[in-house]
Image: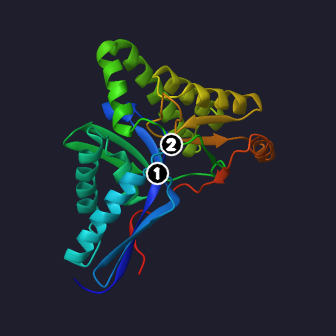
Amino acid sequence: MFGNFEVSAPGKLIISGEHAVVYGYPALVAAVDKRLSISLASGKKKIESDIPIGCGMGSSAAFAVATSAARTFLKKKKLDLDEINKMAYGIEKKRHGNPSGVDNTVSTYGGFLWYRKESEGLKTFSSIKIKGPLPKIYLIGTGKPIESTKEMVTRVGKLYKKDPRNIETIFKKIEKVTRNLLQFFHGEGVVGFQELIKENEALLEKLGVVSDSTVKLIREIEKIGGAAKISGAGGRKDKSGILLVYHKNVKKLQNFAKEKNLELLGVKLGEEGVRIEK
């Protein structure tokens, strides 16, 4: 071992493509300004995180990436991103069974990514350059789902086996939303951000990954002129994790959150990936 150091990795938000990404469809994902850090000093390890756990923001992937980065840095005295990502994916597989790999990839490389799992042995991704100002996105937590990510992915897998034609149709519609959002971020979109978020949520509800109480909350947000969607694996029985929320009039959203006694959390997208802090 050499020296004392701290490594940190960001959480993430899937803007579009959750669940479909497990089956080879693209996902649009961004690293966020919530991070997990591992400090190594005098042979002792300390972990700190401001990423909500089990709510769809990639806390387990950030841990896998930070752990892999610490091991790599101790061995090579530098961060080898490709090796870190590969190692972190292995950790994620042990935890989640059949992950797409998108969470660990965006936590490793940061920014905005277009990601696709072509097969187990081939995962392609590219950085997205954003043109124009980003829409101001907020988060509302519905609470930690009873189900794990693994359980939610398995649930969709069972639906897929039972009715592949219907689920494929939903996945293809999600892909269309994902592509329209890509065009939006490239400054070429004809469909607005709010409309796409609303459509994405409706499709996720058809997959059965959003709880009744969360659906009710989202309808109330839509009623005041906003849009919201789950971001991550979701939850069916009770809570559904974090909601990505957007409203053209932020004041309306703030008043709504206050009235409902909900915490409205601002978030920055496209943040830096894994890094050495000191």
Taking the image as drawn, is residue 21 in sight?
yes
Q: Position of residue 178 (x, y in %)?
A: 48, 34
Taking the image as drawn, is residue 24 in sight?
no
Residue 108 or 147: which is nearer the viewer? 147
* Residue at the image position 46 percent from the left and 51 percent from the top: 53
Relative to 91, say whether 195 is above or below. Answer: above
Q: Position of residue 122 (x, y in %)?
A: 22, 43
Secondary structure, mark 1, is loop
Asked if labels 1 and 2 touch by Cβ distance under 8 angstroms, the answer is: yes
Q: Position of residue 8 (x, y in %)?
A: 41, 68
Secondary structure, mark 2, is loop
Q: Is residue 93 left or right of residue 9?
A: left
Task: Decide: few, some or many residues near mark 1? Use Cα within 10 Å; few <14, some 14-19, many ≥20.
Answer: some
Q: Is residue 144 left or right of residue 163?
A: right
Location of mark 1 (residue): 53
* Residue at the image position 37 percent from the left and 43 percent from the top: 115
Location of mark 2 (residue): 144
Relative to 7, say whether 142 is above or below. Answer: above
Q: Position of residue 125 (x, y in %)?
A: 34, 47
Mark 2: amino acid: Lys
Mark 1: amino acid: Ile
Label 2, label 1: how many angstroms apart (C-alpha)?
Answer: 8 Å
Residue 217 or 7: which is nearer the viewer? 217
Relative to 101, say whether 37 is above or below. Answer: below
Q: Quadrant of residue 107?
A: bottom left
N-term mark: 2 or 1: 1
* Residue at the image position 77 percent from the left and 46 percent from the top: 258
Q: Quadrant of residue 148?
A: top left
